[in-house]
């Protein structure tokens, strides 16, 4: 499954338009619906959090006008990826105790590792992905 959508080009410090912010909610809903359909509802909360953080980062930091979200279920693995065309490589950083932002990839890393998965960034920095063991509701 793939969802591609446009986002507004923004300059540094410009707020995210409501239309773009709603895309995050839409991708969370899409993730939950697909996982429920596949009998993987027990993964909904974790996968929705990962997708939420990755899509938010793509909208907030890419500087581009397109975002692509992919979710694939192959055998016993769930693949999630968000491509934004951003240049540079996103990295996990330490946010200060009072910081309101800057913990997105830290959260992604924590959730992925807790689920015995792996995550990474494409060589060009445009895509952040994760691979999770797909555990059904009866497991």
Image (spheres, rainbow, N blue to C red):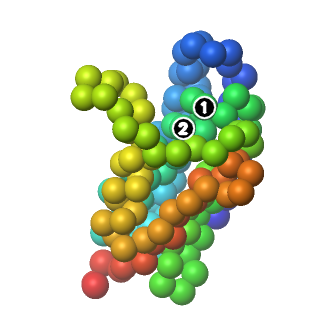
Q: Is 95 placed above or below 119 here?
A: above
Task: Pick whichever, 77 or 95, lies toward us.
Answer: 95
Left or right placement of residue 10 versus residue 110 in this view: right
The residue positioned 68% from the left and 41% from the top of the image is 88
Q: Is 123 placed above or below 61 here?
A: below
Mark 2 closeness class: few <14, some 14–19, many ≥20 residues within 10 Å: some
Image x and y of residue 136, in percent: 36, 80
The residue positioned 39% from the left and 28% from the top of the image is 101
Name the quadrant of the C terminus.
Answer: bottom left
Image x and y of residue 93, in percent: 43, 40
Q: Which residue is disc 2 drawn over?
A: 57
Secondary-structure class at tag 2: helix
Residue 37 visible to an observer of this rendering: no
Image x and y of residue 78, in percent: 51, 72
Task: Pick whichever, 105 or 18, lies toward us.
Answer: 105
Q: CA distance from mark 1 to mark 2?
A: 6 Å
Left or right placement of residue 138 versus residue 76 in this view: left
Name the quadrant of the N terminus.
Answer: bottom right
The residue positioned 68% from the left and 19% from the top of the image is 10
Asked whether the beta carbons under mark 1 and mark 2 sit within 8 Å of each other, the answer is yes
What mark, if any, has residue 61 been given in the picture? 1
Secondary-structure class at tag 1: helix
Residue 44 falls in which quadrant of the image?
Answer: bottom left
The residue positioned 74% from the left and 51% from the top of the image is 124
Image x and y of residue 120, in percent: 56, 60
Q: Is 26 placed above or below 108 here?
A: above
Residue 123 falls in which quadrant of the image?
Answer: bottom right
């Amino acid at each position: 499954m793939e969802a591609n959508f446009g986002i507004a080009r923004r300059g540094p410090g410009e707020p995210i338009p409501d239309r773009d912010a709603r895309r995050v909610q839409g991708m969370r809903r899409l993730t939950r619906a697909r996982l429920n359909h596949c009998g993987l509802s027990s993964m909904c909360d974790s996968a929705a959090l990962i997708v939420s953080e990755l899509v938010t980062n793509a909208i907030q930091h890419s500087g581009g006008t397109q975002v692509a979200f992919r979710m694939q279920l192959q055998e016993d693995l769930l693949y999630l990826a968000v491509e934004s065309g951003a240049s540079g490589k996103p990295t996990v950083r330490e946010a200060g105790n009072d910081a309101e932002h800057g913990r997105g990839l830290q959260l992604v890393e924590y959730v992925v590792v807790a689920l015995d998965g792996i995550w990474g960034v494409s060589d060009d920095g445009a895509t952040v992905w994760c691979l999770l063991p797909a555990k059904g509701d009866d497991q």
